Amino acid sequence: MKPAHAAIYRYSIPFVRPVPVRQTSLDTRDGLVLALRSPDRQHTGLGEIAPLPGLHNESLDEAFDELAATLRKKLPETGNLTLLNVSDTLEERLYPSVRTGIEMALLNLQASITGQFPELPCGPEPATTLPLNALLFGDNATVLQQAEHFYQQGYRTLKLKVNALNKADATGQIRTLDRVFGSSITLRLDSNQSFDLEAAIRFLEALPKKRIAYIEEPLSDPQKIAELFRRSGVPIALDESLWQTPDLRHALPDECLGAYILKPSRIGGITATMKLAIEAEAKGIPAVISSGFESGISLGFYAKMASLLGPNPTACGIDTFRQFTKDILITPLCSQSGSLCVESIWRRSTAPDMSRLTCIEQWTL
Ligand SMILES: O=C(O)CCC(=O)c1ccccc1C(=O)O
Ligand SMILES: [Mg+2]
């Protein structure tokens, strides 16, 4: 299989409301879509390259330059691609967002040609539906309103953004959610490395701990994660640490780890993410496929990835499609009873509304 034509498109989608990332907040999501086409142009494979300010180090322009340079050097002839070998077809030093987009496009092109998405070699039975965690952020009234809305829709896993700077609000929000929904929900917290150790301990001590599955990246100094677990008993999920300090996970006792949060475009590709997911599950740690506010093109693909991990997946962090006023797909993604139907969501993700994409460069490879 060898792509013969390539095109790079650009998109810009407004968020429904400003989305907080690290120190700032964003009004629009900007990204690139790579389309690889077969020699007869009958088949197209799409991949998305969308570094997020505050999450990625590379800018969109830097990603574009590297992507264009990679395409100019020609993509290699490839045999039977799987999620575990697609990475071998590319050179090692690529930005994580660029690697993810090219791997996604190659796998989607092969899936279009063969008529089916490649399964994992010797993998478990795939899931057909995928539960999601609803994302909660904002002031007290907004968080409760959102939680009630999602609960009515069928969501049972809620992920709340908490920040050391307004921990009193977060504490109140979590206690309210516990009082209103009790044991019918599971709460996940994400502090994006905002607490120091002592503040995190005090924060967690004041919470209904039995309701909390884990806290993602509680500490500005992740080296103290084991101590935080020892002193609080709350399992810790790794997100930023997985790429900032990749060896840290091996130094932590398995029982302290609540999950690996896996954002392919930040981890550095489809293969790298699947390998980490398989590592986590082998240790009995949930692998939560998550996203960095990418478009439906990535989210449909990530749904496929998550489904390949087994028939009973943990709730995924790809509910972010609802943060867009209008996605770039012909048929936007939607959930049913708080879950995604994997096959139909992936099919939707392969059909963009071309009027929302601007072509910026194309090649015959
Ligand atoms: O995991 C989810 O449910 C949504 C994704 C999410 O929270 C996120 C989105 C963009 C940047 C960082 C993060 C994060 O998990 O920290
Ligand atoms: Mg996180």
Image (cartoon, rainbow, N blue to C red):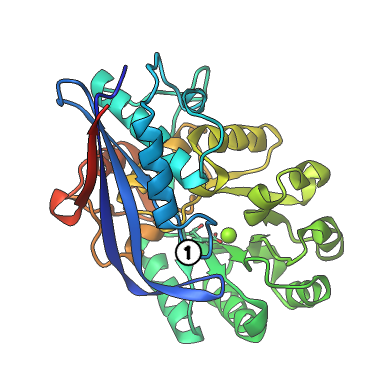
Q: In which quadrant is the C terminus drawn?
A: top left
Which quadrant of the structure image shows residue 79?
Answer: top left
Q: Is residue 341 visible?
A: no
**Rendered view: 321 above or below 175:** above
The percent coordinates of residue 18 (x first, y second) are 39, 76
Circle 1 crowding by C-alpha within 10 Å: few under 14, some 14–19, many from 20: some
Q: Nearer the viewer, residue 201 or 48?
A: 48
**Rendered view: 334 above or below 140:** above
Please count the marks in the image.
Answer: 1
The percent coordinates of residue 343 (x first, y second) are 30, 36
Query: Label 1's element?
Result: loop
* Residue drawn at 26 percent across, 57 percent down: 11
Q: Among all residues in the image, which is located at the extreme top?
A: 79
**Rendered view: 75 above or below 59:** above
Q: Nearer the viewer, residue 242 or 62?
A: 62
Location of mark 1 (residue) = 53
Which quadrant of the structure image shows residue 7?
Answer: top left
Left or right of 3 in this view: 218: right
Q: Nearer the viewer, residue 14 or 133?
A: 14
Left or right of 198 in this view: 89: left
* Residue drawn at 61 percent across, 83 percent down: 172
Name the residue type under label 1. Pro
Q: Nearer the viewer, residue 226 or 258?
A: 226
* Residue drawn at 69 percent across, 38 percent down: 284
Q: Is residue 230 visible?
A: yes
* Residue drawn at 86 percent across, 64 percent down: 231
Left or right of 329 in this view: 308: right
Q: In which quadrant is the N terminus drawn?
A: top left
The percent coordinates of residue 279 (x first, y second) are 66, 33
The percent coordinates of residue 286 (x first, y second) are 62, 44
**Rendered view: 352 above or below 190:** above
